[in-house]
């Protein structure tokens, strides 16, 4: 038995003219890859020169430090040697200082008595000062009327006075003081007699 026929549906057909006028889609170009940055290559000659300069600078720094250390050691050795010499010579210096004081006192007594030996004794005191000067030792110059200074003078006696302006001034120098030239501390303080003000009792 034959199957019944199915009627065909109409199909819309686009004219050829419309197909020819439809633009084709424009292809989008793919983005080009960016070129990679090329790192500059170090110059071996420049690096070698820089290394030599750095080594030279370090060498000069070490040399300067060593020279500074040598100078400090040399100065310290000289200081220790000077201290040793001063320690050994101190008894001699004390004796010469005592002779200086005795000659000064004898010159004063000879002057008061009108004797001619005063000039010779004064010359002897100057000669002692010159001899001490050869050892780089100088007098501190303690003198009558100066203000007492405990760092340079040693008060062995006190003389009373009713004049307040003379209080703590030197009345008499028993032994001159001496020190090394340029030293901060006195080697031998001067032995002095100082004034002490004592008000007069009005009663």
Image: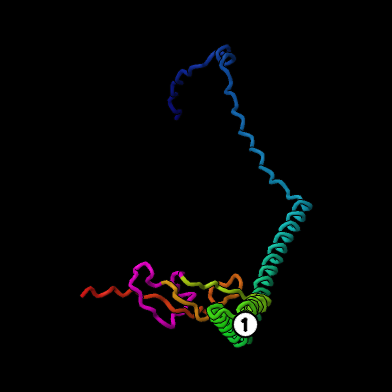
Q: What is the span of residues highlighted in magenta in the rendered image?
A: 145-168
**Quarter of the image where the C terminus is located:** bottom left
Seen in the picture, residue 98 relative to 27 is either above or below; the reply is: below
Q: Which residue extends farthest front?
A: 114
- Element at label 1: helix
Seen in the picture, residue 101 relative to 39 is either above or below; the reply is: below
**Picture coordinates of residue 34, whole percent (x, y):** 64, 38
Seen in the picture, residue 45 relative to 27 is either above or below; the reply is: below
User: Does the magenta run of residues contain 1?
Assistant: no
User: Does the magenta run of residues contain 157?
Assistant: yes
Q: Which residue extends farthest right?
A: 45
| Res. 184 image quadrant | bottom right
| Residue 78 visible, this orientation | no
Q: Give the side of residue 49 with respect to residue 155, left or right.
A: right
Label 1: which residue?
Answer: 86
**Picture coordinates of residue 165, whole percent (x, y):** 37, 67
| Res. 136 image quadrant | bottom right
Please report the residue visible at 60 percent of the width from the left and 75 percent of the height from the top: 180
Nearest the eye: 81 or 193: 193
Nearest the eye: 98 or 135: 98
**Picture coordinates of residue 57, whole percent (x, y):** 71, 59
Please report the residue visible at 53 percent of the width from the left and 75 percent of the height from the top: 185
């Amino acid at each position: 038995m034959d199957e019944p026929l199915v009627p065909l549906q109409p199909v819309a057909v686009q004219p050829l003219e419309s197909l020819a006028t439809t633009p084709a889609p424009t292809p989008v170009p793919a983005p080009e890859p960016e070129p990679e940055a090329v790192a500059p290559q170090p110059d071996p000659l420049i690096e070698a020169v820089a290394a030599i300069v750095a080594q030279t600078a370090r060498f000069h720094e070490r040399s300067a430090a060593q020279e500074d250390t040598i100078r400090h050691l040399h100065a310290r050795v000289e200081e220790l040697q000077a201290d040793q010499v001063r320690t050994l010579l101190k008894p001699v210096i004390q004796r010469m200082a005592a002779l200086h004081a005795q000659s000064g006192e004898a010159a004063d007594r000879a002057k008061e008595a009108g004797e001619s030996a005063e000039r010779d004794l004064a010359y002897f005191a100057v000669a002692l000062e010159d001899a001490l000067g050869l050892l780089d030792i100088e007098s501190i110059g303690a003198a009558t009327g100066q203000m007492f200074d405990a760092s340079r003078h040693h008060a062995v006696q006190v003389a009373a006075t009713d004049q307040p302006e003379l209080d703590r001034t030197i009345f008499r120098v028993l032994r001159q003081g001496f020190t090394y030239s340029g030293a901060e501390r006195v080697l031998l303080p001067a032995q002095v007699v100082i004034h002490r003000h004592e008000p007069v009792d009005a009663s």
